[in-house]
Image (cartoon, rainbow, N blue to C red):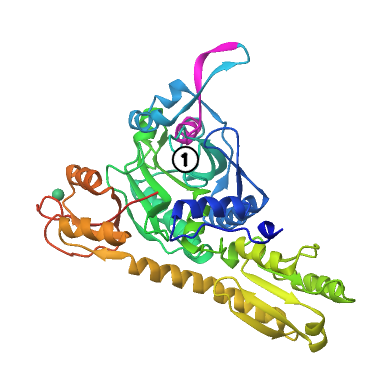
Amino acid sequence: MAKEFVKNVTSMQDDFAQWYTDVVTKAELIDYSSVRGSMILRPYGYAIWENIQKQLDKKIKATGHENVYMPLFIPESLLQKEKDHIEGFAPEVAWVTHGGEEKLTERLCVRPTSEVLFAEHFKNIIHSHRDLPKLYNQWSNVVRWEKTTRPFLRTLEFLWQEGHTCHETDEEAHDETVRMLNVYANLCEEFLAIPVVKGQKTEKEKFAGAKYTFTIESLMHDGKALQSGTSHHLGDGFAKAFGIEFTNREGKLQTVQQTSWGFTTRIIGAMIMVHGDDRGLVVPPKIAPTQLMIVPIAQHKEGVLDFAYDLKEKLSQTIRTGIDASDKKPGWKFNEYEMKGIPLRLEVGPRDIEQGQVIVVRRDTGEKETVSLQGLEIHIQHILSDIQSNLFKKAKTHRENQTTTVTSFDEFKAKLSEKGGFMKAMWCGDEACESFIKDETGATSRCIPFEQERLAEKCICCEQEAQHLVYWAKAY
Ligand SMILES: [Zn+2]
């Protein structure tokens, strides 16, 4: 009995990786499947994804995009068409070689991403500048045969959306790349309460086949970074390889300029590692499947359950409200919903009913408040929005405390091992220095932030003239 009462989570301080595993399983977000590196999204995990998806889908449509659906399989010959792309993805591709007992004449790859499928389709449907821009998005799963896997962060199969667009000019494609990065940044900051750094990936870290890649990077509680969304200007590389041409406004044949951009279930991993604590998950109110959980106290007493159900019905009009009227003890329920990170708990018992009040407890701070039934709904909405902004502020403060400016390689190494987090340092632009830093410290270049500062004149590594300020970190 005692064991069931307290579902313990390993302390973050003791073992962050074990803490993470405990949270994803005990909060019932996922279960492991019999295929290595594949996860089952349980109802609670999937409901969080659905809420993220709803918000993002709205933003994707509001910026003029249409949803489509591409096939799961890519013929090998199609994948081979763009050289950089196949080189980048080949090591992680899963192949289908048989249909039933019969060997296929051509292997089919299970999509790791769908650039080539879109490219082939665009070639067929784009002929004139009047056909442009084409602004498409698809919600799907993709497969990447990863060697080491972690729930949400790296799995063989994951869910995402991938946007694919075609434009007349390089500038239009650039604007689209920026626009969608901003959509992701807004989703992260406004809804998931995760502060992000916006910037460009280095040549080494950019998407295979892209002209350049923009990224949003966030910082986890343990000081490691997580790439949280990317937006690529593809230039005309795929368009040339596939012959996606249109008659331009001058009546001449021209290749299109393309973009692609993706946002995945990985972000749930970020949400866990940015907001979670030793009691489990903390879900930001704006994406929480249940924002308020009602726990009736002494529910066997007359009138308590009826009162609690009435309250649920009333609050449900504007607040995602749940009720647990099971015969488990209130203490078990408190523990359970804290573990699941539900933003607010509402306790109501016979005495509260008599006095026209309820008790409301915040998951983020643990604060307990007695609230009058009059104006309860509005008061709860205020608390929820306060939790939302408090989570963002806390995460931002954490990131600021974990961001260090360094001007020498020794300092870089020392600070990185001492406190982790983001290292801000100047870089000459040479890939050799980037690789050296990675090999020596384990930190990778996260991005060249859009907001540049001139911290020093020389590259932190080779002492040649510095070109860019770069954010570096160990990353998931
Ligand atoms: Zn250098």
Question: Quadrant of the image for the N terminus?
Answer: bottom right
| Rendered view: 119 above or below 439 | above
Residue 298, position as x, y percentages in the image? 81, 74
Q: Amino acid at mark 1?
A: Thr
The residue segment tinted magenta is 102-122
The residue indicated by pointer 1 is 149
Residue found at the far front of this picture: 2
| Residue 114 is a magenta residue | yes
Count of marks placed on residues: 1
Examine the rendering and report whether any part of residue 320 can be seen: no
| Residue 370 is a magenta residue | no
Q: At 56% from the left edge and 65% from the top edge, which residue is drawn?
A: 284
Examine the rendering and report whether any part of residue 427 can be seen: yes
Q: Nearer the viewer, residue 117 or 52?
A: 52
Mark 1 neighbour class, 10 Å CA radius: few under 14, some 14 to 19, many 20 or more: some
Residue 40, position as x, y percentages in the image? 61, 42
Q: Is mark 1 within 8 Å of ligand 1?
A: no
Q: At 53% from the left edge and 48% from the top edge, which residue is drawn?
A: 265
Residue found at the far bottom of this picture: 355
Q: Quadrant of residue 379?
A: bottom right
Of helix, strand and loop, which one carries label 1? loop
Q: Quadrant of residue 399?
A: bottom left
294 left or right of 211 in image = right
8 left or right of 20 in image = right
